[in-house]
Image (cartoon, rainbow, N blue to C red):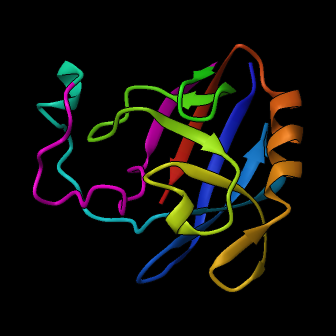
Amino acid sequence: MAHLKLKTIFKGDTYTISKLYIDDVYFCDTIEDVVRSLPFKCPNTSKGLECKCKEKVYSKTAIPGGTYKVILSYSNRFKKILPEVLNVPHFLGIRIHSGNTAEDSAGCIIVGKNTVKGKVTDSIKYLNLLMSKLDKENTLEIIR
């Protein structure tokens, strides 16, 4: 079981940059949506329904800090096996996948190298490397 740790290093107006570690070894950078203050629990997502909390902006809000289970499962959207982050309050269907900006995120975690302001590069390369390091079940600790 791999232990992923996501440590936020920059909170911008339109995106968030973090460093991703695997078993406490730096792996890559990430880009996500904006970190917002959300209530501790969401009454809807705990029942498998869409979040209706006023603090969450759909497709523009980063995952709250905490520890989550990550599994490898088939994504209907991407048509392939990807890491899925489970039981995230206020979120359904959260994945770790490739992309370049927070616009590609919709609440998910985009992996790559933060070599350009507001973007990550080499995302497909880092996603493929990440997939090779993950087990069927993993943990993700997010430190905001």
Q: Nearer the viewer, residue 61 or 124?
A: 124
Judge whether 84 appears above or below 5 on screen: above
- x then y, percent, for residue 34: 41, 69
Residue 71 visible? The answer is no
- List x then y, in percent, for residue 55: 16, 60
From this view, report whether residue 131 is shown above or below residue 113. Answer: above
Q: Is residue 92 left or right of residue 9?
A: left
Q: Residue placed at 37% from the left, 35% from the top?
A: 88
| Quadrant in the picture for the N terminus | top right
Residue 18: x %, y % from top left = 63, 64
Q: Which residue lies at the image location 68% right of the left edge and 66% below the top edge?
A: 100
Residue at 12 percent across and 49 percent down: it is: 53
In the displayed structure image, the side of residue 112 where residue 70 appears, left or right: left
- Residue in the image at 47% along x and 60% along y: 144
Residue that protrudes farthest toward the top in the picture: 136
- Confirm whether the magenta stretch covers residue 122: no
Q: Quadrant of residue 23?
A: top right
Q: Is residue 125 above or below residue 128?
A: below
Q: Can residue 42 be seen by looking at this rendering?
A: yes
Q: Nearer the viewer, residue 84 or 142?
A: 84
Task: Determine the image quadrant of residue 14.
Answer: bottom left
Left/right placement of residue 81 relative to residue 85 reads right
Q: Magenta includes 55? A: yes
What range of the chain is rendered magenta?
Answer: 49-73
